[in-house]
Amino acid sequence: MCFFIFKTIVQEIFRYIASIMKHFLPFSPDIVRPLMQSKEVAIIIEILKRKNPKRVLEWGAGYSTIFFSRYLSSEAKWIAVEHDKEWYIRIKRLVYDPKIMIFYVPPNHIPWTDPYEDGSFSDLRDYVKFPEKLNEKFDLIIIDGRARKFCLIHALKFLKNDGIVILHDSNRKYYHEPFKLYNYQVLFKDSRQVAGGIWIGSKTLDPKCILNIRKHKLNWKIMELFRPIWYISSIRHSRRIIHVQRT
C-alpha cells in the first residue's frame, strides 16, 4: 500500500512536469490530451484496455476523441457527435485515424432553455437522438457534451446488454437523476463542484469486472492532496487551448 502511494505521487509529479513542458512544444494531434485530470484519464484508459470495445459512441467530440481512440483495435470504430460547428471543424481537421467518424448535428434551439445552460432535450433533440440513425448497439458510450442528462437516458437504447456508459463531469449533481436507470454503477467524485468526476454505469456488467475500483478510489484520495498543483496546471493548459483556438 505504501509503495502504491509513493508510486502514485511520483507519477503525478512527472505528469505535472510533462504538462508544463507541453506548453513549450508546437501544437499537433500527436500531443493532444483530453481536458481531464490524469486520474480521470487513467480510468477510461483501463476500461478501454480491459473492455476492448469494437464500437464506441461519444456525445461531445474533442481532444478525447483523438486521444482515447488510439486504444482501440484496428477493426474498431469510434463515432462522435458534436453540436458546435466551429469546434466540429477544428477537431475534424486533427483527425487522421480512419477508425474515427465525427458527425455535426446542430442544435434545435439556441439559447439553451434549461436553468443549468447545458441544453434541454428540446434544445438538442436531434443531437441526443442522432444515434438512432446509426442502427447499431455500442460496447462503450462516453457522454461529455451537451444535454448530458438526456444523453444518459437515451444511451440505454443504444447500449449493448454488457455495454458500459461513462459520464464525465459527474460532480454536477443535476446529472444524477438518470443514474437510477442503470443496474450497476460506480461514481468517482472529488471536491470540485461544477466540473470533473467520472460515473460508470451498465445494464448487466459490474464495473469492477473491467476496472480496479479500489485502486482508483485510493488514487483519487491521494490526488486531492495535489489539487492546488492541478488547478494551476489546468489553468495553463486551458490558456494554451484558447490561444490555439484564436490562431
Image (tube, helix red, strand yellow):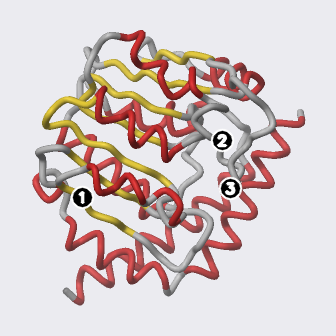
Query: Counting other residues with Cα less than 10 Å from the Cα at mark 3, is it few (<14), some (14-19), or many (20 or more)?
Result: few
Name the residue rendered at 59%, 63% in the picture. Answer: 195
Name the residue rendered at 66%, 52% in the picture. Answer: 22
Say the numbered circle drawn on residue 122: none
Q: Secondary structure at mark 3?
A: loop
Q: 164 above or below 18?
A: above
Label 3 and label 2: CA atoms lie apart by 8 Å
Say the numbered circle drawn on residue 119: 2
Q: Quadrant of the C terminus?
A: top right
Question: Would you name the residue on which mark 3 appears?
Answer: 116
Amino acid type, residue under disc 3 in the picture: Tyr
Question: Would you name the residue on which mark 1 appears?
Answer: 185
Label 3 with label 1: CB-CB less than 8 Å: no
Name the residue rendered at 24%, 23% in the picture. Answer: 54
Q: 165 above or below 186?
A: above
Label 3 and label 1: CA atoms lie apart by 24 Å
Side of 236 where 146 appears, left or right? left
Q: Quadrant of the N terminus?
A: bottom left
Q: 181 above or below 66?
A: below
> Observer-nearest residue: 171 or 56?
171
